[in-house]
Amino acid sequence: MPKLSLSEIQKVARLARIELANKELDKMTLEVGSILEFVDNLQSIETDGVKPTSQVTGLKDVWREDIVVNCQIPREVLLSQAPDVQEGYVKVKKVL
Amino acid sequence: MTELEYLSIGKAHELLASKKVSAVELAQYYLDRIKQHDNKVRACLYVCEEEALEQARLVDDKIAAGKEIGTLEGIPYTAKDMFLTAGIPTTAASKILEDYIPPYSATVIEKLNKAGAILLAKVNQDEFAHGGSTENSAYHTTHNPWDSGRVPGGSSGGSAAAVAMDFGIFSLGTDTGGSIRQPASYCGVTGYKPTYGLVSRYGVISMASSLDVIGPLARSAEDAEIVLKAIAGRDEHDSTSIELELQNLAPANSCTIGLLGSYNDLEQVKNFTDAINGASEFSEKEFIDPALALATYYILVPSQISSNLERYDGIRYGQSTNQANNIYEVYAKTRDEFFGPEVKRRNMIGTYALSAGYYDAYYKKAMQVRTILCERLDKLFEKFDVLVMPTTLTPAFELGSKNDPVEMYKTDILTVSANLAGIPAISIPAGVDEKTGLPLGLQIMGKQGDDAKVLALAREFQQKTDWHTQVKAIKR
């Protein structure tokens, strides 16, 4: 795997929704590159036909009854942690 | 007054039940210790003095009324700042959660609360548990109680330092790749990572959901087991949690022991074979190249982190930028301002590994190697009940000595496999390094659900040796 270019890092930062200052971008490019180099030895392992493991419990389809359980925590307590609130709602900048 | 230094849970319970010490006196003893000594190690982020004393008074009322108390009733403990505690600040040692007051508590905190255990303080860690030294805390660095020029390990470094300093009898930590065991090893205490799913993750700040587990750091395997029994069990709020019969522990002499043969010259391994007979060696080839396990880990974990940390959006809770002109900038500038460097790095790696065109080469590949690793371990567990190896290859390193992220990652080289396979593992003190005088940890792993066997062997070792009591000799 080739190391990353500056423009690739910018693209990833945008996907991750993290704004990085120009100075930080250079450092990040180097560091991310060296971490990718470090994990590169995985490519030497033959994995054709090997099933991927996404979880190790073996649990399957854990269901519960589809019933409404009322939240015990008062609305004001939950809203008290939001940075911007108006008339009992969380306030967000225009999305569309 | 009765001697209170380095009490075990059992001994503290005995003192409380026989009215030799009151719960308030006991809590006050630890609160005073924190006041006197925390400036040397800086383990604590928030001390809940009033709440602790209030709870202790309730226990004393119960004792005064002649009622019987449970094993954990009145037992003071600390918790890593990853655990939500209703009404008590919880930051994950991140600036993005500065001033955050959770509206509810994690299931494990609730369970300990019901059992009557007393929360003394929230303790330091690497930001969002990303790290192995606690130097990534956005608030301050914690120092190793044995040598203030060294790290306590991490990410549960505050928990390990707190237990070693006798700030409470045990501490709750989280372990995604070694974050309980590595600091336990560096601070000379016992750190136990249960089988994945055995303890509910509800209300614990997520790092990598398919690997995260919760467990105790304590004075001994015996204490760790008491805590485990109080916090384990299926929780309807965590669909990955499981119920496991924690039967009375089988004696370890019925247990076949495999020893990773590559490290026989290390002090802690020699001390183990001196104390416990009958271990047979297995090779690194039968295990898996630890470097490969580490590489697998450092793809899977940042990927799951990048998805779990999306919730910090500057909108619903936590800190938010005031520099944003649109919704994109609310996310992007909030994360830039309030995430530390390692958190940003892991987000970037994860986002890259999951992005279009790279998923197969990184994430899928790592999940496949995870399968191979699990199969190798299954094979070893056909031959052995438990596997023994060092927890870390060196004692605690010096503060500021690992500036390269990859060098820091390598301290987890022998611990990550247990997380990838979801198996139980414990680190116990098993020696003291001649050159530095620092503690050395030994790791015991078992197969999934064999927590009892792992704990039994650790207990047997601790019955035959006194390495786990060396922590009392720390110079303060």
Image (cartoon, coloured by chain):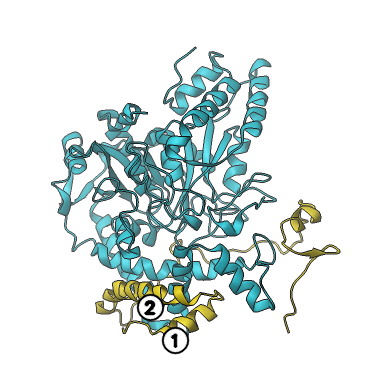
Going by the image, does B396 lie left or right of B79?
Answer: left
Kindly indicate the quadrant of the structure image that contains residue B250. top left
- Type of amino acid at the residue the image marks with label 1: Ser
How far across and how far down the image is residue A52, in percent? Answer: 39, 74
How far across and how far down the image is residue B132, in percent? Answer: 38, 54
* Chain B image colour: cyan
- Is residue B309 visible in the rendered image? The answer is yes
Going by the image, does B369 lie left or right of B431?
Answer: right
Q: Which residue is mark 2?
A: B362
Disc 2 crowd, CA 10 A, few/some/many (<14, 14-19, 20+): many
Quarter placement of the C terminus of chain B: top left
The secondary element bearing badge 1 is classed as helix
The Cα–Cα distance between marks 2 and 1, rounded to whole angstroms, is 20 Å
Q: Nearer the viewer, residue A89 or A43?
A: A89
- Is residue B368 visible in the rendered image? The answer is no
* Chain A image colour: yellow
> Which residue is pictured at 76% across the width and 58% down the height?
A79
Q: Residue furthest front?
A: A23
Does A75 sit above or below residue B252?
A: below
The secondary element bearing badge 2 is classed as helix
Kindly indicate the quadrant of the structure image that contains residue B456. top left
> Which residue is pictured at 58% across the width and 33% down the height?
B118
- Type of amino acid at the residue the image marks with label 2: Tyr
Q: Which residue is mark 1?
A: A7
How far across and how far down the image is residue A21, in percent? Answer: 50, 75
**Marker count (numbered):** 2
